[in-house]
Amino acid sequence: LMLVQQFSGINTVMYYAASIYEMSQFDETTAVWLSGFTALALALGVGGSIYLVDRTGRRRLVLLSLAAVTVSLFGLGLSFYLARVWSEPVVKVIGDDCQAQPGAMVWSGETEYCYDCTQLPGCGFCGGHCVAGDENGPFDLNLCPPAGLGGADAEHDKNQIKWVYKACANPAGDLSVFFMVAYLFAFGIGMGGMPWTITSEIYPLRYRSLAVSCSTATNWIGNLVVAATFLSISSPQVLTAYGAFWLYALVALAGYVWLYFCLPETKGLSLEEIEALFAHDHHGSGQRHKNAYSGYNFVGESDTSYENDDDSDGRDELSMPPFAAMGSSGDEEDDINLETKQ
């Protein structure tokens, strides 16, 4: 549960929200404001989970959350892919450093769109050309003169070619915001709090402190691994931004399939009943196992294990499993009968 929680990418989104929006071609100021806005979606989701946990159940919240997280992560990756292919195409590349992304692993690396051009350090886009430059403009002004230079006439200024550095126009920007908010809300309503709730319930009492410590350590180790690797795997040289989010979507999907078959429902059960769930094969059904302790007959509403003996002196016998012989009396074994008053 803790590994699925972390490897579905939640803390990459929380830690690097502003960077993710910049990858989606928003400017720096807008990215910072959007990151603060989208963080509220997680808080709302967690608030919803507090209300629903004892009404809907742990298992249902986890599965609904993971299903929505999978769809949201796939959509978020798709928005980044569309940001690339919907940006202006590159007609001509000028300069060796702007020809291709060096060391690209999962795509050709060739500069085909404005998005590809602005991902290259020291390169910018203007008028269908990808050329060397910086934030102030191209190094060779003859390649694409910046707006406002080269003439005093207003009509002349309007017709100057715009210099694009770091962020192209992104028609899919609203889609990125939508799926980011959807992802954080979906995560908060189930996978945000349910792993902590479930792991506090499922462990046997004698091992609970050690087991909870291990699961907590697993959570933070997963957090460290994902946070430390996100910027690397989302770089154009490795998986690209859309490839990274599709990877997280696959993790969430795998977690959904596994938990569908392995996670029982623990809503409304005592700690003893929850322990009994994991002492037998449950196949993810979440059904209560009434006879959890083999050899004992538990008394329920329809229990008929008590047998009246008309010849007894007002007492009944409840048969209990035999214990090993005590002492050293040869082959004799003692049968222990628990007598209870009628």
Image: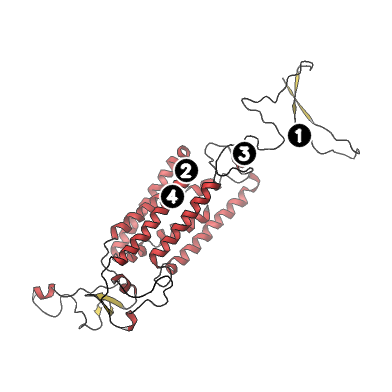
- Mark 4 element type: helix
Q: In the picture, residue 157 is in which quadrant?
A: bottom left
**Residue for badge 4:** 67
Q: CA distance from mark 4 to mark 2?
A: 11 Å
Q: Is residue 118 above or below residue 182?
A: below
Q: Nearer the viewer, mark 2 or mark 3?
A: 2
Q: CA distance from mark 3 to mark 4?
A: 30 Å
- Mark 1 element type: loop
Three-letter amino acid code at the position of disc 3: Glu
Q: Is residue 310 above or below residue 197?
A: above
Three-letter amino acid code at the position of disc 4: Ala
Query: Residue 236: x, y in percent?
Result: 39, 71
> In the rendered view, does 139 fall on the left or right side of 179?
left
Mark 1 and mark 2 lie on one chain; the one further toward the N terminus is 2
Mark 3 and mark 1 lie on one chain; the one further toward the N terminus is 3
Specify the quadrant that holds the C terminus: top right
Mark 4 and mark 2 lie on one chain; the one further toward the N terminus is 2
| Count of marks overlaid on the render | 4
**Residue for badge 2:** 60
Considering every residue shown, the one lying at the far right of the view is 330
> What is the image's colouring?
secondary structure
**Residue for badge 3:** 272
Three-letter amino acid code at the position of disc 2: Arg
Q: In the picture, residue 111 is in which quadrant?
A: bottom left
Mark 3 and mark 4 lie on one chain; the one further toward the N terminus is 4
**Residue for badge 1:** 321
Query: Residue 270: x, y in percent?
Result: 58, 37
